[in-house]
């Protein structure tokens, strides 16, 4: 049985104010599934920002600029397996290292270094963080709906 997702809201977090909603998080965390379910529930269109801005390349200047744009123009909800680095690696690395996806790293140790850098960046940009390890996508969406009300 899946566990319930947990919410972590930063001290400086804003309440939802009808801005466009963005969902961020590391690869293989389940963003696409969550976004499709959320968009259907809210009767909204959804766009995959990977298709829009990330795929052309991983230029760090562009990524930093995009992070700022998300913070200013959207209500950003980060979905993470955990705020703990080791737990996040244990959840995501097998999903990414399945032969179908690219971890963009050379092994688990390098992936752990990436996670150590990335997780605080997702939290920094987020208005709310939902910890989703072992939770169903439907439960995550229900929690996000509560955040948005």
Image (cartoon, rainbow, N blue to C red):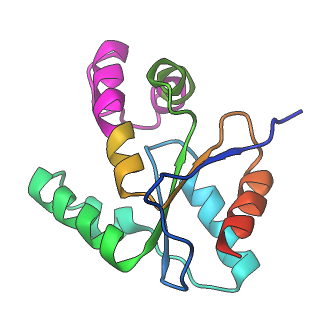
Q: Position of residue 75 (x, y in %)?
A: 47, 72
Is residue 17 rendered to the left or right of residue 112?
right
As rendered, which of 16 and 50 lies closer to the eye? 16
The residue sitting at 54% across, 31% down in the picture is 95
Q: Is residue 70 visible?
A: yes
Image x and y of residue 39, in percent: 65, 76
Q: Is residue 37 visible?
A: no
Residue 46 position (above or below residue 65): below
Q: Which residues are magenta?
A: 93-118
Q: Quadrant of residue 73?
A: bottom left
Q: Which residue ends up furthest to the right in the rendered image?
A: 1
Which residue is found at the position 56% from the left and 75% from the top? 16
User: Where 130 falls versus 2 (above or below)?
Assistant: below
Q: Quadrant of residue 2?
A: top right
Q: Nearer the viewer, residue 124 or 62?
A: 124
* Residue 102 falls within the magenta-colored stretch: yes
Pinpoint residue 59: horizontal percent, then vertical percent.
12, 53
* Magenta stretch encompasses residue 101: yes
Q: Residue at x 79, y 53 (%)?
A: 139
Q: Quadrant of the C terminus?
A: bottom right
Q: Answer left or right for 35 relative to 134.
A: left
Q: Quadrant of the N terminus?
A: top right
Image height of 144 relative to 100, above or below: below
Give x and y (percent) for residue 137.
73, 52
Give the answer, above or below, for where 123 lies relative to 105. Answer: below
Foreground: 15 or 44? 15
Q: How many marks?
A: 0
Tell me: 128 left or right of 122.
right
């Amino acid at each position: 049985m899946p566990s319930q997702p947990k919410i972590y809201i930063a001290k400086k977090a804003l309440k939802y104010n009808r801005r466009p909603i963005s969902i961020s998080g590391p690869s293989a965390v389940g963003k696409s599934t969550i976004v499709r379910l959320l968009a259907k529930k809210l009767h909204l269109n959804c766009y995959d920002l990977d298709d829009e801005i990330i795929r052309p390349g991983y230029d760090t200047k562009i990524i930093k600029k995009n992070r700022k744009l998300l913070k200013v123009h959207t209500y950003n909800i980060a979905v993470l397996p955990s705020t703990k680095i080791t737990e996040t690696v244990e959840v995501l690395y097998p999903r990414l290292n399945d032969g179908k996806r690219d971890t963009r790293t050379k092994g688990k140790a390098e992936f752990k270094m990436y996670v150590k850098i990335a997780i605080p960046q997702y939290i920094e940009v987020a208005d709310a963080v939902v910890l989703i390890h072992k939770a169903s996508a439907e439960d995550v969406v229900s929690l996000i709906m509560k955040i948005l009300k």
